[in-house]
Amino acid sequence: MKVTSVATTFPESDTYRERHLPAAIMRADDAATPPLWTTQYPFPLGRTLALPNADGTGYQDLPPGYTPESPTTFDYTPHGLSFSDNYNLAFPTLIPSSSCPRAYAHGLGFPSSMSSMPNSYPPSAYLLEPQRPQEVLDIPNMSTSSQLPQMQLNDDFEDPVPRAEWKEHPTYSQMQSSEDSGLRSAPQDAPSMGHSDVKIECLGDDAVDKEQPYAQLIYRALMEAPGHTMILRDIYNWFKENTDKAADKETKGWQNSIRHNLSMNGAFEKVDQPGDETKKGFLWKLTEEAIREGVKSTTRYRSKQPNKRGHRSGHPQPQRQISGAKGGQASKRSAKLRRSNRMNGFYANPRSVPPDGPYSPGYESAFDIGIPLSTSPYYTSDSDSGQSIDLGGIGGYSPGSPTAPVHSYPASSHEPLVPNGFHVILPIDPQEPLFYDDTPSNTSSPPADEPLTPSSVGDWETENGYPTVTPYIFDDYNPNYRESLH
DNA sequence: CTATGTAAACAAC
DNA sequence: GTTGTTTACATAG
């Protein structure tokens, strides 16, 4: 498999660059004249590539002969698995969509019926560039690409609309024609090339990010980051450069909101920052689940407090909490408890619940084997059993490489690795719908927002001997079930 | 009621 | 002052 380059957008922050970019790349990036990318695989100008080592501890050297002026095509088969395979596995379904990730929010590019808020923000809804196969793959392999719904991988967000309807949608036709045209070599055929470009392409104004929730934006930021990790400061910077949240006000509210979302949304986890880092804070990282399935609303991670709106006085209560009720030590304790519970087994993945049950003695504590310090509450409240499926955590954290954590998931030499550090998780049955109705069912079906366990042979969970039935847990807002791990 | 944004209390550094 | 956690409240839909 040939890879011309890996394009991603990096925040301009120096600290970020220093942390994530190899010197050579930084130099290339700094080149006054943007590199000329092959016409076949156009890439964002001024941006460059960073191929993580297979072990995730660093970055590969640029291919021999590479220069900013004459980028070369080189082979890159870190795990003997073609990228098309990766994509194929990771994005098994044909999803039409516009190139605008926010279409759902704006109602652009889709029928109004498709604008309903998804249960989660699927990865590709924000994977604007990083996982776009056209930018990574050597398309000429038509046999492969024919299997691969590459064009549809662009931003397949949760789509409740039957596929039959997709075909009637303009966007779909557009994609079809694009597909028919063969190589998407023409610039106009190429999907959005960079995050900032996307904004322009989609709406042509800065209003784009205004309506995108923080969780999504953070997700995007992290998706663009090597190893899907960033420190808070860089996330701030990313927001400054890519959103209008920061520009809107001079207040610090947006930063608070970012922190709030990082803390409260289970899609984000923090990993320790070993080494000589700024020692200021943690690295924030996307969970594997988030990478796979996207962000879910932060709301669902919030504690289930009774809605007191009915009898509210109209202004904040003078002393709405006792000391330690929130934040601080008590918070940390509870977080730790949750973490412990989580690590205690079934926190991680409902589908990874050991046969003996979540509290099975033999169930190894992921927390003890060096995993992300994931305090992000994939949970509801302290009384919650704190479930989450942070499989990425289990064995997914490489303490020695904060900038490129190894996502050994599933642990295998065939672990698919996308050049920019994305480890594509795949065991999704091609027949399996990407998204599900979130309506709690009165039947035995799993929580609706939970992807159904693939029933096909070869399902990794099955291989692990774990049950494929997701236990019911109670969701914050739905007493009928609890979301397992998100 | 849900999703989201925001303010703020607090603790630890 | 920054970072992270958590609660509370406001608001739009």
Image (cartoon, coloured by chain):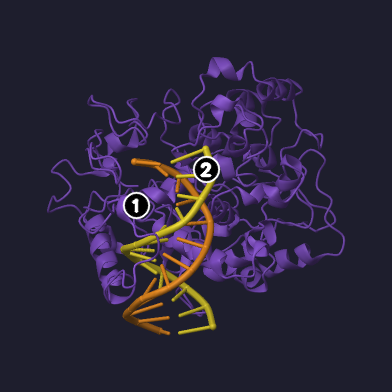
Chain colours: A purple, B orange, C yellow
Task: State which tag comes first along the sequence, 1 or 2.
Answer: 2
Query: In this picture, is A327 found above or below A199?
Result: below
Q: Amino acid at mark 1?
A: Arg
Residue A309 located left or right of residue A23: left
- Residue tagged by mark 1? A309
The percent coordinates of residue A365 (x first, y second) are 23, 58
Q: Nearer the viewer, residue A475 or A97?
A: A475
Residue at 56% from the left image edge and 40% from the top image edge: A124
What's under tag 2, amino acid-wise?
A: Pro
Q: Foreground mark, 1 or 2?
A: 1
Residue A470 seen by the camera = yes
Count residues near mark 1 (Cα–Cα under 10 Å), then give few for <14, some for 14-19, many for 20+: few
For mark 1, name the chain: A
Mark 2 residue element: helix
Q: Which mark is residue A123?
A: 2
**Horizontal and vertical percent position of residue A139:** 69, 32
| Of A84 and A277, the residue lying toward us | A277
| Residue at the spot 39% in from the left edge and 52% down from the top edge | A392
Q: Is residue A94 visible?
A: no
Q: Residues within 10 Å of mark 2 (few under 14, many from 20)?
A: many
Q: Position of residue A38 (x, y in %)?
A: 81, 44
Q: Quadrant of residue A394?
A: bottom left
Extreme residue toward the right, this view: A33
